[in-house]
Amino acid sequence: MTSFVAIDHFTKASLTAIPPDEKPTYNSLKVIHQELNANAMAIPPTHGGGHYGHLALVISTPAFNALPNTVPWDNPEHPGAAPVHGAAPTGAQISETNMLFAAQETKFLVFRGTETALQKQLLEAVPDTFTKTLKHEMYGYAQVTALQILTHLDNTYGTIDADDIKDNEKRMNADLSPTQPIEDLYNQVKDAQKFAVDHDVISDKRAISAIIGNLTKSGVFTDALKDWRKTTTAEQTMVALETHFTAADKERRRILTPKAVGYANKATEKSGKATDNKPTPTGNGIPMYYCWSHGLGPNNTHTSNSCSKPVQGHCKEATADNMMGGCCVIRRMFGEKAIYRRPQRECANQNNDENQPPANR
Ligand SMILES: [Zn+2]
């Protein structure tokens, strides 16, 4: 083997670069770590390394040895200028020695080619200002490995400060919309836990409390939350929580009529987002839209602002949280037949009843 071009085998031809005017941060370095790890693992090991290719070149030895199913890693040595044969070797011994020599040379060339390519990618992704302290006046970065550069960057710029922790909390508690899969909520909380693991650990108890808080705020899991609160603290594990609320979410989605879902899909196709008007989730998780003249309904193209048949006094700005004195009826799902009839009230004149619902539209 005379040459090995590692970059041809990498999963990422270049790393996500840090802009020249920005300092590396924990998050930007994390992305670089992930990309370098993937590239290093894409080069199969010719010795050792277990399942992880050449990962040992970009993570610390303790971190590498702590991985499951790994084999301790030693950087391969160059076998020398030429195979060394014993005195009066047989033909078989000569070919055996040549074969071992070639194999050792291949290991070394693959290792060197990979190390050089990873180091080059890293230096291209990070502005020189932040690695310069490792640069030799005469030989540049020839004497430093990718791992040494990464360690320097992590120690100098990769620490997490109070603002990062605050931002992480914000991401953990970000509102879940009724149309999002509930798995998004589990993931955002687990990502926050992962982020905080070395700095300000978010216990499962806190993570569960964040999820419950979020679901309570969403207003669409009232019954499931009641059932959850009946369980004991010992029963309230992350696994139990996911099982319980995933089932509740499945039921909630089943209740959503295909037509209502269809409306949402149509609106998404048209405008690229669910709707320009904020839906009001009901207890069943059905998003509803408010019109001052016609009340609350499932049609997201019918709001105070878009109403095609406004009645006198119509307020275009009225929403479910600020009805501005508008109509207080709930319209039926599209195509649903009305069976209910308002019972006759004593001394009441039905025609003067201000709450008489208008015809379904
Ligand atoms: Zn209307």
Image (tube, rainbow, N blue to C red):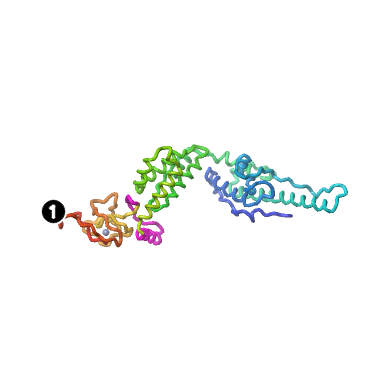
The residue wearing badge 1 is 348
Q: Quadrant of ligand 1?
A: bottom left
Viewer-proximal residue, 120 or 341? 341
Q: In which quarter of the image is the C terminus?
A: bottom left
Viewer-proximal residue, 312 or 35? 35
Q: Position of residue 242 (x, y in %)?
A: 44, 46
Q: Say which amino acid is labelled 1.
A: Ala
Q: Where is residue 188 in the image (x, y as percent from the top left)?
A: 46, 46
Magenta includes 265? yes
Could you classify mark 1 by the number of other residues whose Cα lies within 10 Å: few (under 14), some (14-19), or many (20 or more)? few
Viewer-proximal residue, 181 or 197? 181
In this rendering, does residue 131 appear at all? no
| 14 to the left or right of 217 | right
Magenta includes 327? no
In this rendering, does residue 289 appear at all? yes
Q: In which quarter of the image is the N terminus?
A: bottom right
| 348 to the left or right of 360 | left
Q: Position of residue 281 (x, y in %)?
A: 33, 51
Residues in magenta?
258-284
Residue located 72% across and 51% down the image: 106
Q: What element carries label 1?
A: loop
List the single residue furthest toward the left. 347
Viewer-proximal residue, 238 or 311? 238
| 8 to the left or right of 252 | right
Q: Where is residue 206 in the image (x, y as percent from the top left)?
A: 44, 39
Indicate the quadrant where residue 169 lies. top left
Residue located 66% across and 48% down the image: 115
In this rendering, is residue 60 above or below 355?
A: above
Indicate the quadrant where residue 59 lies. top right
Give the mark count: 1
Mark 1 vs ligand 1: CB under 8 Å? no
